[in-house]
Image (cartoon, helix red, strand yellow):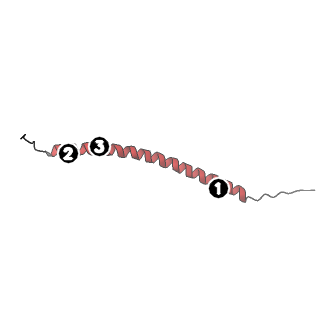
Amino acid sequence: MAEQEKITREDIESKFRELTGDVDDRAEAAKTTAVTVGAVVAVAVVLGVFLFGRSRGRKKTTLIEVRRF
């Protein structure tokens, strides 16, 4: 049998940093994407509410015509 090397604290820490580094990179990329999507959705909602309120205001506006003879 081959001799097994002892696993040191440094080995465990380096492997843990390697694994968490990949997760951190992916989390950062996902966060950036989520912020972009959230901003686009927020702008779309504000624009939709503005247009809906504008069209509703036009429907409810009373137009009075004054004629003089």
At which x and y percent is residue 13? Answer: 20, 45
Q: Which mark is residue 53?
A: 1
What quarter of the picture does the C terminus occupy? Answer: bottom right
Crowding around mark 3 (Cα neighbors within 10 Å: few <14, some 14 to 19, many 20+) is few
Q: Secondary structure at mark 3?
A: helix
Instruction: Work out whether mark 3 precedes mark 2 in sequence or the reverse, and give the earlier one.
Output: 2
Instruction: Work out whether mark 1 precedes mark 3 in sequence or the reverse, and give the earlier one.
Output: 3
At which x and y percent is residue 41? Answer: 52, 50
Residue designated by label 2: 13
What quarter of the picture does the N terminus occupy? Answer: top left
Residue designated by label 3: 21
> Are circles 3 and 2 on residues that touch, CB within 8 Å?
no
Q: Secondary structure at mark 2?
A: helix
Residues under labels 1 and 3: Cα distance? 48 Å
Relative horizontal placement of residue 1, taking residue 33 as reference (left or right): left
Amino acid at dot 1: Gly
Q: Residue at x 39, y 43 (%)?
A: 29
Q: Nearer the viewer, residue 15 or 68?
A: 15
Relative horizontal placement of residue 47, taking residue 9 as reference (left or right): right
Amino acid at dot 2: Glu
Crowding around mark 2 (Cα neighbors within 10 Å: few <14, some 14 to 19, many 20+) is few
Q: Residue at x 88, y 56 (%)?
A: 67
> Are circles 1 and 3 on residues that touch, CB within 8 Å?
no
Q: Residue at x 56, y 49 (%)?
A: 44
